[in-house]
């Protein structure tokens, strides 16, 4: 099963860097949307229902934390931010990992390993799909 990814990042250079690093580190995953703000991230999530969402914390419109709270357990969330003071809130919102900018390839690899392990434990890429399968 191919894993679908949504990236929400308001900084153009960081969007490009994250896409490049993900393509190198996880070539079988498919980026289904790159959003420039929290509102587009939420709308894109509803449209594409990705398995994994990489969210910046501070974006125009909805913040990454607000988007993560709306997503709930319907996807795996990884935060990518320059602000370390939001880490506790991010993990309270169910984050798999919390990457500080500028994202380094080695640190992304560790985050992806953690993410893949969580996905293996669930048996399905998207935790929401597992919940639907049980009902």
Image (tube, rainbow, N blue to C red):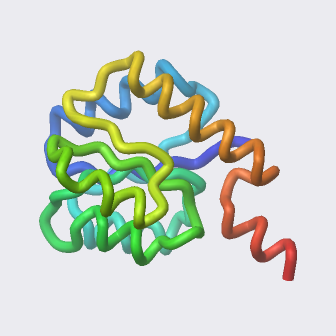
User: Viewed as shown, does residue 82 lie left or right of 91?
Assistant: left
**The N terminus appears in which quarter of the rendering?**
top right
Q: Residue at x 58, y 48 (%)?
A: 4
User: Viewed as shown, does residue 100 lie left or right of 129?
Assistant: left
Quadrant of the rendered image containing residue 57? bottom left
Q: Residue at x 48, y 19 (%)?
A: 24
Q: Position of residue 59 (x, y in %)?
A: 16, 60
User: Measured along the vertical axis of the image, is residue 73 above or below residue 6?
Assistant: below
Q: Is residue 32 visible?
A: no
Q: Position of residue 10 (x, y in %)?
A: 17, 51
As drawn, the residue found furthest toward the bottom would be: 135
Q: Is residue 80 visible?
A: yes
User: Measured along the vertical axis of the image, is residue 44 above or below residue 28?
Assistant: below
**The C terminus appears in which quarter of the rendering?**
bottom right
User: Viewed as shown, does residue 8 lie left or right of 2?
Assistant: left
Q: Residue at x 31, y 63 (%)?
A: 89
User: Measured along the vertical axis of the image, is residue 112 above or below residue 5?
Assistant: above
Q: Residue at x 37, y 33 (%)?
A: 19
As drawn, the residue found furthest toward the right would be: 134
- 64 or 24, which lies in front? 64
Quadrant of the rendered image containing residue 18? top left
Q: Position of residue 109 (x, y in %)?
A: 49, 23
Image label count: 0
Q: Position of residue 119 (x, y in %)?
A: 69, 46
- 16 or 91, which lies in front? 91
User: Viewed as shown, does residue 2 lie left or right of 110?
Assistant: right
């Amino acid at each position: 099963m191919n894993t679908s990814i949504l990236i929400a990042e308001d900084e153009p250079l960081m969007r490009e860097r994250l896409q490049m690093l993900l393509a190198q580190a996880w070539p079988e995953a498919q980026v289904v949307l790159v959003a420039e703000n929290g509102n587009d991230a939420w709308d894109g999530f509803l449209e594409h229902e990705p398995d994994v969402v990489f969210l910046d914390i501070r974006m125009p419109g909805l913040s990454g934390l607000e988007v993560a709270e709306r997503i709930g357990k319907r996807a795996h969330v990884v935060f990518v931010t320059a602000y370390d003071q939001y880490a506790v809130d991010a993990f309270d919102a169910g984050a798999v990992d919390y990457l500080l900018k500028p994202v380094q390839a080695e640190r992304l690899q560790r985050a992806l390993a953690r993410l893949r392990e969580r996905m293996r434990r669930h048996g399905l890429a998207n935790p929401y799909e597992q919940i639907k399968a049980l009902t």
